[in-house]
Image (spheres, rainbow, N blue to C red):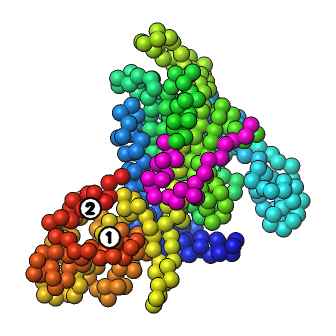
Amino acid sequence: MAKQNDELMEKLVSLCKRRGFIFPSSEIYGGLASIYDYGPLGAELKKNIKNFWWRWMVQKHANIVGLDSAILMSPRIWEASGHVDSFTDPLVDCKKCKQRFRADLLENESVCPNCGGELTQPRQFNLMFKTFMGPVEDTSHIVYLRPETAQGIYVNYLNVLNSSRLKIPFGIAQIGKAFRNEITTENFIFRTREFEQMEMQFFVQPESDQEWFESWKADRMAYYHKLNIHPEKLRFHEHGSNELAHYAKAAYDIEYEFPFGWKELEGVHNRTDFDLRRHQDSSGKDLTYFDDATRERFIPYIIETSAGVDRTLLTVLVDAFEEQELEKDTRTVLHLAPSIAPIKAGIFPLVKKDGMPEIAEKIYRLLSPIYPVYMDVSGAVGRRYRRQDEIGTPYCITVDSETLENETVTIRDRDTMEQNRMKIDDLSIFFFDKTQS
Ligand code: ATP
């Protein structure tokens, strides 16, 4: 089983490279450990995942607004938040082979999983990347690359509140890069040192924290179902007291069953008033909220939902990947939800004559301003279908001799491989219906 799972990951990594989803970064210079670049299809898929999340969290909730804060922030933020002191992982070294590990991820904390050698005692290693602001490289000029997007939201909470008509409960959502100098990186893009997060911080009245926590847990699970992820491969994992982060009162991970085991996909946390209280104490600014209805003043509690863009992308690829044994060959197919598929339709003239390429071109011009579509004029049509199946294109439109007579085309469904005829005039509404999330 383990071997099969390794093979599946190998096939996926190879597909990602071959078809232009994901490349190792700096490859012509030998690569840079666990940093990846997204190729044409990967960039499209990533953008679609972010849009899907933004629509779900921001557009569909009248009381959630967006933010785009800077990566570099005052270092005082990371002192107040506890990251300078506590954003650490326990690091152990193998005395024999010199490899390094994160002690809390090892099954046996005293034996090297690589060579069986003795391990050192764990020491705490801070995961924040440091750099210097301005020309002087001394400790007073240190700034950090943010290890999470959340703090940018907390320190803008007053700005957002004062510039909008929001009332508690309300949320602020943000998508952006985060950086962590991870001790061990693993499993392709599962754990990398540069990645993107999609975080939403929901500000609530302190007594209603549990209710909102439960509500967001349910909402976030529903989101993954809507993304077409197999429900039996998703579960909640509750953090025990030894796992809870320094800021959290309660935390659940939404986990996915990857080929390498059940792993965290997203965290839902009750961060209490920890962050705003710490920033209030540290900055000296009043961060309390006055509730007109109850005439009470309080520091809001925060329920956080924190997901990784790259980890979601890996999840949808793993979950969508299938090799189907057909009568004559094996079909590789990605069953991606149409709303996130990089290309929505392949457009094929059956043959390169009789005016078919011109009609295909017309369909391309009709759809391409709104939907990414791909025109393919060469090779057997079966092979053209397979090329699109492999990258998750949900539909293929074929112009054939009947098109010349009645302005209809065939539209083939990636998953069922069934073909139906449709009027060219109905294509726009068809794609609108199918690709909305
Ligand atoms: P872990 O314990 O696995 O290191 P974490 O609990 O520290 O992860 P969070 O701080 O809760 O992770 O981060 C929220 C989300 O951000 C994660 O669920 C994941 O999707 C994403 N994420 C965190 N670290 C990484 C990473 N190094 N690479 C890719 N995605 C990450």
Which residue is located at x 42 percent, y 12 percent?
292
**Dot 2 amino acid type:** Phe
Q: Which residue is mark 2?
A: 431
**Dot 1 amino acid type:** Tyr
Residue 191 position (above or below residue 333): above
Q: Which residue is mark 1?
A: 395
Q: Position of residue 104 (x, y in %)?
A: 76, 50
Mark linked to residue 199: none
Whether pointer 2 and pointer 1 mark residues with C-beta atoms closer than 8 Å, the reply is yes
Which residue is located at x 42 percent, y 48 percent?
53
Q: Position of residue 192 (x, y in %)?
A: 59, 56
Which of the two residues, 333 or 134, is positioned nearer the viewer here?
A: 333
Residue 421 is left or right of residue 316, and the answer is: left
Does ligand 1 reach within 8 Å of label 2's beta carbon?
Answer: no
Q: Which residues are magenta?
A: 219-241
Q: Can you say which quadrant of the picture contains the N terminus? A: bottom right
Q: Secondary structure at mark 1?
A: strand
Quadrant in the picture for residue 114: bottom right
Q: Is residue 232 magenta?
A: yes
Q: Is residue 68 visible?
A: no
Residue 311 position (above or below residue 286): below
Q: Earlier in the sequence, mark 2 or mark 1?
A: 1
Q: Is residue 332 magenta?
A: no
Residue 41 is left or right of residue 123, and the answer is: left
Q: Report the Cα–Cα distance between label 2 and label 1.
A: 9 Å
